[in-house]
Image (cartoon, rainbow, N blue to C red):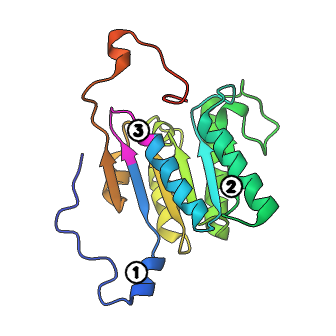
Amino acid sequence: MTGHQGVPPVNPGGTQREVRLEHRLLVFTGEGKGKSTAAFGMGLRAWAQGWSTGVFQFVKSAKWRTGEAAAYAALDEAHRATGQGGPVEWHTMGAGWTWLRATADADPAALARAGWEKVAAQLAEGVHRLYILDEFSYPLARGWVDVGEVLDVLARRPAPQHVVITGRGVPPAVLDAADLVTEMTKVAHPFDRGAKGQPGIEW
């Protein structure tokens, strides 16, 4: 992993408000468990702040009934019913994306590209305050989505829009551009001894 030693302070001389309004690119990567969990934890804080959040899952199947999806749907419903928190938009590539007629049987590279194009359009319009691009590292690493294009779009996005990317094998150029990079290191995992995933722990 590349480092960020010697990087100058963000917005030197800026006011406290200006610094707080600067957007950030955050990456959770590595071989250990907890990358998506960290991103969704950030999403909970965003909801409590009243932010609008967009979640785009680039790998997981829509058939997986995850606790995060159920919890975020409940939070979105609470916001619409009471005004508490912020709205949540959730999309899963395994469903073929909700805004497309394509199905889960469509080419995964084409679906990944369509997902990124949706994110890029929303960034240009300033739709959300927080974007969680879950397992977006895989389309980037496989060349389904151009890394240079992604970095260009992120560099030009209006502030404040924070973007979180999760997954193994994040391209070095993305790590270099990120404001925060955390690498999850596996020390031990139940799967190593043949254990199965458990509800409430894995989903």
Establish if 19 lies above or below 172. Answer: below
Most foreground residue, 148 or 184: 184
Q: Which mark is residue 34?
A: 3
Please indicate whether residue 42 sits to the left or right of residue 51 in the image.
left
Residue under the point 50% across and 43% down: 136
Which x, y percent locates residue 59?
Answer: 57, 33
- How would you rate the neighbour count of disc 3 (Cα within 10 Å): few for under 14, some for 14-19, many for 20 or more? some
Query: Which residue is under mark 1?
Result: 19
Task: Check if residue 39 falls in the magenta segment.
Answer: no
The stretch of residues the image draws in magenta is: 28-35
> Magenta stretch mostly in which secondary structure?
loop
Name the residue carrying label 2: 88
Total marks shown come to: 3
Q: Residue at x 43, y 66 (%)?
A: 24
Q: Nearer the viewer, residue 203 or 2?
A: 203
Residue 140 horizontal/vertical position (percent): 47, 42
- Foreground tag (1 vs 3): 3
**Between discs 2 and 1, the one toward the N terminus:** 1
